[in-house]
């Protein structure tokens, strides 16, 4: 991957990590029970458990994403969260003012899921060397 593409993926990773971290933090600060009540109102099963799982995934996943640890796995989790948000809550509101933000986050997550982000990533510390050059390969 070219240096410019690595910088772009890095910027997407940091932005996505920050957004999800802040949203997870807000869920904990506002009371996960309130998120559970909202989940119940839109028909999500086991709303209190799901609220805790989503809040924890957003908070911890945001931190992992910021430091570049498990980027592809966390991206898959974020993509699932966004798909559920779009199809259970946002879709009836239409694109503008509805699901546009969640769609942007979904596409960012899919980009990182497919391509990863190695620039300034903790994952590089754990990458195995499988190349002939002696450098870690893209994880």
Image (cartoon, rainbow, N blue to C red):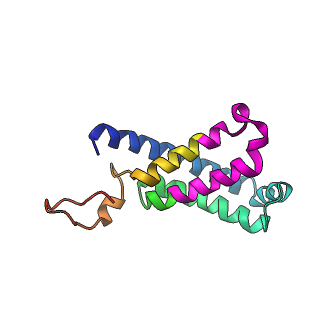
| The one of 62 and 135 positioned closer to us in this rendering | 135
Q: Is residue 122 left or right of residue 45?
A: left
| Rendered location of residue 120, percent (x, y) | 33, 50
Q: Is residue 30 magenta?
A: no
| Residue farthest top in this picture | 96
Main SS, magenta residues: helix
Q: Is residue 82 left or right of residue 137?
A: right
Residue 45 position by quadrant? bottom right
| Rendered location of residue 118, percent (x, y) | 34, 52
Stretch of the chain drawn in magenta: 75-103
Residue at image coords 14%, 63% = 132
| Rendered location of residue 134, percent (x, y) | 15, 62
Q: In the figure, 101 relative to 120: above or below?
A: above
Q: Total of numbered circles in the picture? A: 0
| Residue farthest right in this picture | 41
Q: Is residue 90 magenta?
A: yes
Residue at image coords 69%, 54% = 84
| The one of 77 and 54 positioned closer to us in this rendering | 77
* Quadrant location, the C terminus: bottom left
| Rendered location of residue 56, percent (x, y) | 62, 62
Residue 33 position by quadrant? bottom right
Q: Is residue 32 left or right of residue 137?
A: right
Residue at image coords 77%, 56% = 35
Q: Is residue 24 left or right of residue 13?
A: right
């Amino acid at each position: 991957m070219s240096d410019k593409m690595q910088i772009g993926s890095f910027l997407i990773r940091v932005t996505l990590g920050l957004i999800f971290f802040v949203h997870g933090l807000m869920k904990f600060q506002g009371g996960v029970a309130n998120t559970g009540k909202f989940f119940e109102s839109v028909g999500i099963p086991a709303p209190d458990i799901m609220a805790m799982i989503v809040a924890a995934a957003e908070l911890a996943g945001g931190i992992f994403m910021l430091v570049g640890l498990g980027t592809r796995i966390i991206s898959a989790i974020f993509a699932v969260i966004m798909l559920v948000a779009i199809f259970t809550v946002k879709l009836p509101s239409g694109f503008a003012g509805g699901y546009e933000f969640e769609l942007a986050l979904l596409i960012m997550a899919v980009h990182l899921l497919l391509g990863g982000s190695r620039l300034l990533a903790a994952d590089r510390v754990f990458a195995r060397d499988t190349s002939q050059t002696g450098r870690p390969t893209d994880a």
